[in-house]
Image (cartoon, coloured by chain):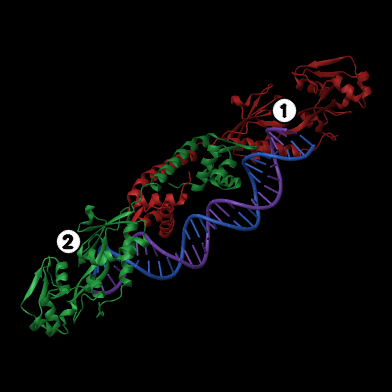
Chain colours: A red, B green, C blue, D purple
DNA sequence: CATATGAATGAATTTAACTCATCTATTGGC
DNA sequence: GCCAATAGATGAGTTAAATTCATTCATATG
């Protein structure tokens, strides 16, 4: 299927419709000479004369008359389809699924900057403790904590979560041994795994298992555990990224290490959809926020 | 109706069909980069993303899926129509209407040269003493003797007919006065007019009316008049172009002048038709034959 | 982990499209 | 009949679009 140069077809169709090279040129915003050249080229390509030239007039040949309606209808269909697609409403909204704590602690404090950078994008946050199936259409993208696998999705790693002991400065803790006289604040993870930040695991990493007190308090909501720590009721093992504001305010301190590694946060999306551009813009913005955030803990490698 | 650049539409259709820029490039005999550029240009022109890019793969968006069948069907229809026109039998035959004497005396002796130059053109001669209406489809072209008018036709002048006294050399005529002892051979013209070559007219032009004998023979077929002249039966007023061969063979001589002017021969055609190219080729060949023919009579002008 | 695969980007190159100048053959008005 | 207007043709020169080349990126595969 080797078509003649398409410009020749277009020139022919216009000239045939107008029965005039001059008027066809006017419509296509070129000189009549250009039309003349194109039609001559088409005739040479096909080896068939399409117009009979008369002084000041052109007349379609039989072959020309056979071709004209095909091109006329084809180009009309092209134009119609193109106009339809051009005028289709472009979605400027994206819905992002986020776990509540991340929304509250990491995302919301930063959102003014996204709005300033993308004033035309309508961002909707869909919070859920469970991972949302993006194929379901509930959300266009998600910020997920875990190891995936993100099969069939585009996944951008944001950063790796880390957990350290955090407590109120009024407790006066200085070193791991001080934990013997403290209360451990536990959080019940929905899905514990190897990377779940438990005090037991921390104790092993810190080689401080025998400093761990037997007494403690458990919470089902991690924000409650944080509140208790701020209130001086104990020491919580939590992510400093999520409590950056409280640390900056002096409500919480990191008395000692080490940090233990958790999973990574990923920004994931389907890689498709009419608002892909906006979805990707949000991801790019997240990436820049991660890159520009000052480290809270000295990185020991990853 | 402003369409995007047509090359972009073609690249898109091929990429959509193949679901691969690489394979589309192969089909269109360009590099994959060219496809990538074209599709990007189309997306920018429309302001809509048409493909979702994945590593090593592209997937049509909704908008892309909407456009694809329109272009697929349109270009397929174009290709089909073009192939049909390309393969249509091109007429390689032309029918030329000619008066019998011209066919016999001027055209036929020269035809081998036309055949040699245009071996693929089938020339059919349609002889008729009457002018044929070319719109009737009996003939594609005609060689006509007269002044026209050739309204609505393309007319190329071939040469102006001339008439001189011609006779057998055995008659021994040397000057107009010798006509007194000769027999005049007359031809009955179908449509006499001012330019009809009669002996009476010749006599007036030659200022030799009083040399003209009263006796003569009339023929209804000009070829018979020529034959009689060759046989030595008299003097005929005829066109030397039509008897060039007999002059060259010494069968006829032009004992004296002057020549009188007749009408012109024209090659005429409609200027249209599938075999216009061949019709025009025949006209061009006639023109070259006329140009290359050595003059028989010294031209006195016109 | 190394390699293969295929799309993206941007500068450089190539090519096709287009313009300009001129010519030709009417056609229409005076 | 003459002359200006009209519209298509031709070919060289110019311009803009198409294409390539070099390089990068993100997987996917062995």
Nearer the observer, B135 or A217: B135
Nearer the observer, D19 or A11: D19
What residue sits 21% from the left and 78% below the top? B253
Disc 2 is placed on an element classified as: loop
What residue sits 14% from the left and 70% below the top? B225
What residue sits 60% from the left and 45% below the top? B32
How crowded is the residue under tag 2: few (<14 C-alpha within 10 Å), some, or many (20+)? few
Nearer the observer, B3 or B112: B112
The residue pinned by badge 2 equals B129
Nearer the observer, A28 or B170: B170
Chain letter of disc 2 in the image: B
How crowded is the residue under tag 1: few (<14 C-alpha within 10 Å), some, or many (20+)? some
Disc 1 is placed on an element classified as: helix
The residue pinned by badge 1 equals A102
* Any part of residue A121 in sight: no
Is B23 left or right of A176, judged from the image as shown?
Answer: left
Looking at the picture, how far across and down is residue B177, in whole percent?
12, 85
Is A109 left or right of B293, judged from the image as shown?
Answer: right
Between disc 1 and disc 2, the foreground one is 2
Spot the residue most to the left: B214
Where residue C3 sits, quadrant-wise, is top right
Q: Do tag 1 and tag 2 residues touch (Cβ < 8 Å)? A: no
Is B130 left or right of A132, judged from the image as shown?
Answer: left
Q: CA distance from mark 1 to mark 2?
A: 104 Å
């Amino acid at each position: 299927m080797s078509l003649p140069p398409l410009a020749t077809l277009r020139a022919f169709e216009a000239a045939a419709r107008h029965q005039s090279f001059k008027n066809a040129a006017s419509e296509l915003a070129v000189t009549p000479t250009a039309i003349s050249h194109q039609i001559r080229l088409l005739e040479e390509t096909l080896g068939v004369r399409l117009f009979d030239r008369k002084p000041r007039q052109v007349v379609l040949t039989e072959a020309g008359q056979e071709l004209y309606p095909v091109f006329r209808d084809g180009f009309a269909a092209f134009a119609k389809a193109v106009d339809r697609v051009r005028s289709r409403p472009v979605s400027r909204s994206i819905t992002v699924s986020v776990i509540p704590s991340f929304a509250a602690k990491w995302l919301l404090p930063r959102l003014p900057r996204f709005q300033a950078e993308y004033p035309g994008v309508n961002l909707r946050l869909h919070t859920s403790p469970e991972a949302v199936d993006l194929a379901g259409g509930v959300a266009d993208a998600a910020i997920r904590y875990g190891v995936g696998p993100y099969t069939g999705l585009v996944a951008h790693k944001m950063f790796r979560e880390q957990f350290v002991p955090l407590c109120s400065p009024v407790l006066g803790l200085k070193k791991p041994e001080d934990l013997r006289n403290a209360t451990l604040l536990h959080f019940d993870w929905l899905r514990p795994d190897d990377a779940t930040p438990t005090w037991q695991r921390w104790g092993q990493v810190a080689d401080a298992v025998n400093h761990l007190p037997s007494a403690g308090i458990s919470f089902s909501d991690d924000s409650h555990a944080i509140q208790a720590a701020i209130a001086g009721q104990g020491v919580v093992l939590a992510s400093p990224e999520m409590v950056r504001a409280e640390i900056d305010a002096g409500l919480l301190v990191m008395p000692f290490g080490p940090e233990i590694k958790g999973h990574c946060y990923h920004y994931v999306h389907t890689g498709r959809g009419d608002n892909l551009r906006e979805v990707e813009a949000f991801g790019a913005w997240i990436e820049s926020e991660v890159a520009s955030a000052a480290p809270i803990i000295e990185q020991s490698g990853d």
